[in-house]
Image: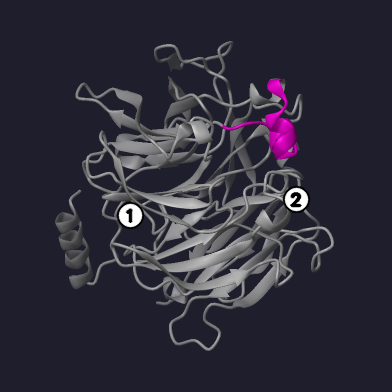
Amino acid sequence: MKRREFGALAAGALAMGLPFRAFADETCQSPYMPKITGQEEFVYVWTLGVEGMGDEQDKLVTIDLRPGSATRGQVINSVSVGGRNEAHHGGFSADRRFFWTGGLDTNRIFIFDVHSDPSNPKLHKTIDTFVKDSGGVVGPHTFFALPGSMMITGLSNDDDHGGRTALVEYNDDGEYVATYWMPTADDMQGAVAVGDAVADGYGYDIRALIRKNVMLTSSFTGWSNYMMDFGQMLQDAEAMKRFGNTIVQWDLHTRQPKKVFNVPGAPLEIRFPWGSNANYAFSTTALTSQLWLIYEDDAGEWQAKAVADIGNPADIPLPVDISIAADDQTLWINSFMDGKTRLFDISDPHKPFQIYEKVIDRQVNMVSQSWDGKRVYFSSSLLANWDKKGKDDAQYLKAYNWDGKELVEDFAVDFYELGLGRAHIMRFGSSALYSS
């Protein structure tokens, strides 16, 4: 979708007093949920507790983003959940009334009520039976909202704590529905390996293109690696073999795997654009530092190919989170090791190229942008045992304004200075979502 077409579509919807329901959210979330197309009022930060710091617990931190507010740019609330669980990712329910988050180590799932008072979320429910419910899945990672249910990707299993894992579905009441194991070379479950792909059974992210009935999952590594000290793991030749190299195409409605693509080097986040004819998604590989395109070809078959390098792959910048602008023209890509964010022009998805870069801090992980792309937020933590050490272990949320040419810092919140912990995933909140 061209920038002009997107603007006309959005303006037309707003002029008719209709909510603009493109296939997107302001931060590349589930297309089933309502989105914030105006000013985000709050940002919720799922935060890892640190031993000896504050209450030492994982917590959901709320920061005020309301223009004109006396507390704008400040922490206004925090909900601790008890203990350290390796807090990681989270996602809203399809009605956006609840925010689901997970702990990669303890496998606990925390569901927060964000609609009763969006400025002050409350812990609504805790699920302590994820491993038992799912039949042995470990490491609840991505929370992807479906109508009436939540699809959760696992990272590992309780048999060998390796990378073989599954998708696990719960209904909106937090009751277990089903487990869908990733295909492996020994059990393809009807899927077809494309080219030299070898189904490894690993999992990480999940996204869907509803009108094409396509769901994609990526692959990372198991508990034995993500809970290991990062420096130790890099020196462990056997550990470095335990990373995923595949993206799987699924039938969204039947939850059946259809194709396995070879995407070497641990493909992480998956993002679909919003355009009505945009039949493709992007992903990046952590270890090989490449931007990948998963796309539908002229024959209607889905394919995967590398389309660009991210920085110098030989330096292993370790690409992490990515975010597509709502007009499909640009893509932010963070890389953890050099603390940089890079902006790619993706107007031709088959030939993307970098147009901007900036160092955010000594390390950077997540990126979220407002619907209009004018405000971009960054947070710092990757994993407790993978974050940098000493003075390089910067923990923050930073807000920037983007004018199309330069990121200009608006404000920053130092999570260590406030005794909060390690700042991981961010999601926006707004009271306007719940007004009649």
In magenta segment, residue 253: no
Element type at marker 2?
loop
Residue identified by numbered label 2: 85
Please tell me which residue is depicted at 52% across the width and 40% down the height of the picture.
317
Where residue 365 appears, as percent x and y from the top left, is: 55, 51
Specify the quadrant that holds the C terminus: bottom left
Determine the residue positioned at 25% across, 41% down: 278
Residue 313 can be seen, yes or no: yes
**Dot 1 corresponds to which residue?**
325
9 displayed left or right of 148? left
Is residue 385 left or right of 313 when viewed as pictured?
Answer: right
Q: How is the image coloured?
A: one colour
**Number of other residues with Cα within 10 Å of mark 2, as a class: few under 14, some 14 to 19, many 20 or more:** some
Identify the element where label 1 is drawn: loop
Look at the picture and state if 11 lies above or below 380: below
The amino acid on which the numbered mark 2 sits, given as a three-letter code, is Asn
* Amino acid type, mark 1: Ala
Q: Which residues are magenta?
A: 220-237
Task: Tell which tag, 1 or 2, sits nearer the viewer.
Answer: 1
Q: Nearer the viewer, residue 359 or 219?
A: 359
* For marks 1 and 2 on the same chain, the one whose residue lies earlier in the sequence: 2
Residue 35 in the image: above or below residue 108: below
From the top left corner, tell me how far across and down residue 419 is, in percent: 74, 69
Name the residue at the right extreme: 52
Image coordinates of residue 235 in percent, x first then y, are 71, 28
CB-based contact (under 8 Å), mark 1 and mark 2 = no
**Image quadrant where residue 386 sits:** top right
